[in-house]
């Protein structure tokens, strides 16, 4: 700071204490409360929408992840893929037995899609796009499925002309409960409905199916039981290991013809798909924020024009150009920070209300709230730079002169 | 001249042009020397350069030509920040249109006079309270300017100018907006402050009022045409 050849007595320099800089920097805001509030609203809307987007999507994701955790991520599914010629491959008949021999596999069940239709009765043409699956009683355990009405197939009923309905199947067939002993018709034969399943979020294909015992399928429909899907529960710590050996275990000769998947992955993907929409909304919030920032810059420029006298006065009292610049940058930053605080509060409130209404667990991202306030502060400081420079560059003699 | 103290303020052959076509010569070859404790009136017609002269003396404006020396410091040798430092401690301004902060109390307005000296707020207010009592406004400290009369506001502005005990007080038409009785009270106040040791330079277009002051400098078209207590020596130094 010291220029050569010039006497510089530090006792004669102007000084502005930090606390005074802060009070001076909010003086303009305190003396024009209405304008301050209206200008802050612009920033608040931008911050609020961004916080709400983050809060809502994080609440929805928290909900989904909790749901996935509840359903378990150790359910694997094996399906036939296609062979080298692109034709549909088949799972070997002994595949379920092979899978059960893998150490960390707790249990496994297979289903076989039968080439037949199901309808409510012979007068109904519509087959509702429902599948008829032959399966075994332990499917209930493997899928961790719950029964909403009646019972699942057991060793006895699996050999009789009885069916259990998936939740969607029951709905489409118009069977709400088991009162009156409802029946369905499969390939011209009547089957008694003995149970209805709760929806299975991991296995929507089961929801759309009518389940029948393997033995009954062979006996009453003359079906040949070839597994079209095998479900298995693995030790949660060994899911990946099991997944890696599955295709080779199921079809050692052609492991490529086996498709292994984890149904919970699909749900997790849904959580990720939302990111596109989230980014779009964040972008819109960012635009709102930017517009708010431009609004602040505008108001600050007007404020500098209106307050020439005050600026001149402060210069006459000993303020340096830098003191004046700092005052206006601080003013702009505090204005924006006020907007950021209002916006974060608003965003949190919107998140809370929306999540409550959706029945989600509320997950307000604290980091986003903090980031919202800091972003507003930084934006405000930048928006204030140009007006502050203009204020600092005002010629003090011009500024004190009556307009 | 040997019995005189070191002049507090010296202008040597000062000129000030404002840009324009042709440029406005607001001050021309002004030489002036003001000692400690003087009370000087600057008079002259509108547009004669009085405000320009005051701004140059107060270092708000730099002269186009010549030399301004305040408290042994050559203004030309000081940076903008250096001048600000000089203003913060050595010079007090009173403006015709007050330039008070409307949103804060009289006390805080006066305390602002010490803001850029880096003095803590508690101490500023204590000193400001003294200054307000000195101008007779001890009972109006917590009123804001819009709640005060013109004369009271002007006294707040004067209190702010003197709160830091500056060597020089510069007042640009401090009575311009006031009725004659209030004007007289303000002039009386300036006299009292002067009696307490402050050097005061006051612009006025009120000739009657100026006539009662010990020294009058008359400007015409930027030139000093009369100085009732001129220091010819200063002019000689400049030549
Ligand atoms: N910023 C400026 N730009 C150009 N010309 C200016 C500027 N400021 C003042 N002037 C001109 O300089 C001259 C002196 O102006 P100044 O304000 O010093 O006069 P004054 O004696 O204070 O007048 P008044 O009694 O009306 O206040 C005038 O002619 C004025 O028009
Ligand atoms: Mg003037």
Image (spheres, coloured by chain):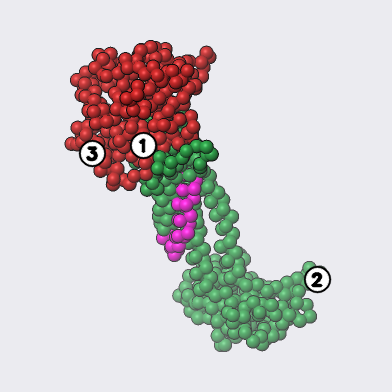
Chain colours: A green, B red
Residue B50: x and y in percent read: 38, 18
Residue appearing at x 66%, y 79% in the figure: A241
Q: Quadrant of residue A111?
A: bottom right
Q: Secondary structure at mark 1?
A: helix
What predominant SS class does the magenta segment belong to? helix
Mark toward the viewer: 2 or 1: 1
**Residue drawn 48% across and 44% down?**
A381
Residue farthest to the left, as pictured: B139
Query: Is B155 left or right of A18, judged from the image as shown?
Result: left
In the image, residue A219 sits, relative to residue B113, either above or below, namely: below
Q: Which residue is mark 1?
A: B89
Ligand 1 within 8 Å, label 2 CB: no
- Residue picked out by circle 2: A84
Residue found at x 48% / y 79%? A150
- Residue A238 is situated, as x and y percent measured from the top left of the image, at 62, 80
- A391 sits left or right of A190 in the view: left
3 vs 2, front mark? 3
- Tag shown at residue B130: 3
On screen, residue B72 versus residue B133, left or right, reads right
> Which of the two residues, B217 or A403, is positioned nearer the viewer here?
B217
Given the image, what chain letter belongs to the residue carrying mark 1?
Answer: B
Mark closest to the chain's N terminus, 3 or 1: 1
């Amino acid at each position: 700071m010291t220029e050569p050849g010039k006497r510089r007595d530090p006792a004669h320099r102007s000084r502005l204490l930090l606390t005074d800089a802060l009070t001076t920097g909010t003086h303009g805001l305190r003396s024009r409360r209405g304008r301050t509030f209206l200008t802050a609203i612009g920033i608040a809307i931008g911050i609020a929408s961004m916080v709400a987007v983050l809060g809502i999507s994080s609440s929805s994701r928290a909900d989904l992840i909790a749901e996935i955790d509840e359903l378990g991520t150790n359910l694997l599914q094996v399906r036939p893929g296609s062979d080298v010629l692109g034709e549909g491959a088949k799972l070997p008949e002994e595949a379920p037995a092979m899978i059960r021999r893998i150490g960390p596999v707790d249990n496994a069940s297979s289903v076989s899609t039968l080439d037949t239709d199901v309808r409510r009765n012979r007068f109904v043409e519509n087959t509702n796009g429902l599948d008829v699956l032959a399966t075994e009683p332990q499917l209930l355990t493997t899928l961790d499925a719950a029964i909403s009405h009646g019972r699942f197939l057991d060793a006895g009923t699996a050999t009789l002309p009885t069916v259990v309905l998936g939740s969607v199947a029951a709905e489409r067939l118009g069977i709400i409960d088991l009162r009156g002993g409802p029946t369905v018709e499969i390939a011209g034969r009547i089957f008694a409905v003995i149970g209805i399943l709760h929806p299975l979020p991991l296995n929507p294909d089961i929801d759309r199916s009518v389940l029948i015992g393997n033995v009954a399928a062979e006996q009453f429909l003359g079906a040949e039981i070839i597994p079209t899907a095998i479900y298995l529960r693995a030790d949660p710590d060994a899911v990946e290991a099991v997944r890696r050996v599955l295709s080779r275990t199921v079809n050692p000769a052609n492991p490529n013809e086996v498709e292994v998947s984890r149904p919970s992955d699909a749900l997790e993907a849904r959580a990720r798909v939302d990111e596109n929409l989230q980014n779009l909304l964040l972008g819109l919030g960012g635009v709102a924020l930017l517009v708010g920032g431009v609004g602040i810059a505008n108001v600050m420029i007007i404020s500098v024009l209106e307050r020439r006298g005050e600026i001149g006065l402060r210069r006459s009292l000993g303020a340096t150009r830098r003191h004046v610049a700092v005052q206006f940058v601080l003013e702009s930053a505090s204005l924006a920070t006020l907007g950021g605080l209002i916006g974060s509060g608003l965003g949190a409130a919107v998140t809370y209300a929306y999540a409550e209404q959706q029945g989600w667990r509320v997950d307000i991202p604290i980091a986003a709230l903090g980031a919202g306030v800091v972003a507003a502060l930084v934006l405000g400081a930048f928006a204030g730079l140009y007006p502050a420079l203009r204020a600092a560059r005002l010629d003090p003699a011009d500024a004190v002169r009556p307009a | 001249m040997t019995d005189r103290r070191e002049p507090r303020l010296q202008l040597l052959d000062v000129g000030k042009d404002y840009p324009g076509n042709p440029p406005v010569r607001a001050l021309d070859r002004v030489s002036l020397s003001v000692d400690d404790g003087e009370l000087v009136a600057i008079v002259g017609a509108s547009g004669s350069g009085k405000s320009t002269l005051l701004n140059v003396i107060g270092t708000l404006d730099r002269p186009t030509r010549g030399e301004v020396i305040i408290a042994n410091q050559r203004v030309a040798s000081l940076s903008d920040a250096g001048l600000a430092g000089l203003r913060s401690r050595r010079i007090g301004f009173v403006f015709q249109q007050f330039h008070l902060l409307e949103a804060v109390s009289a006390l805080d307005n006066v305390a602002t006079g010490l803001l850029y000296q880096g003095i803590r707020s508690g101490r500023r207010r204590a000193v400001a309270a003294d200054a307000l009592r000195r101008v007779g406004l001890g009972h109006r400290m917590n009123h804001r300017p819009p709640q005060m009369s013109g004369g009271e506001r002007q006294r707040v502005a004067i209190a702010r100018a003197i709160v830091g005990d500056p060597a020089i007080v510069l007042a640009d038409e401090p009575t311009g907006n006031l009725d004659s009785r209030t004007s007289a009270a303000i002039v009386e106040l300036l006299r009292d402050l002067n009696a307490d040791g402050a050097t005061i330079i006051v612009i006025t277009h009120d000739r009657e009022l100026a006539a009662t002051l010990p020294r009058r400098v008359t400007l015409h078209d930027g030139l000093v045409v009369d100085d009732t207590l001129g220091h010819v020596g200063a002019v000689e130094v400049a030549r």
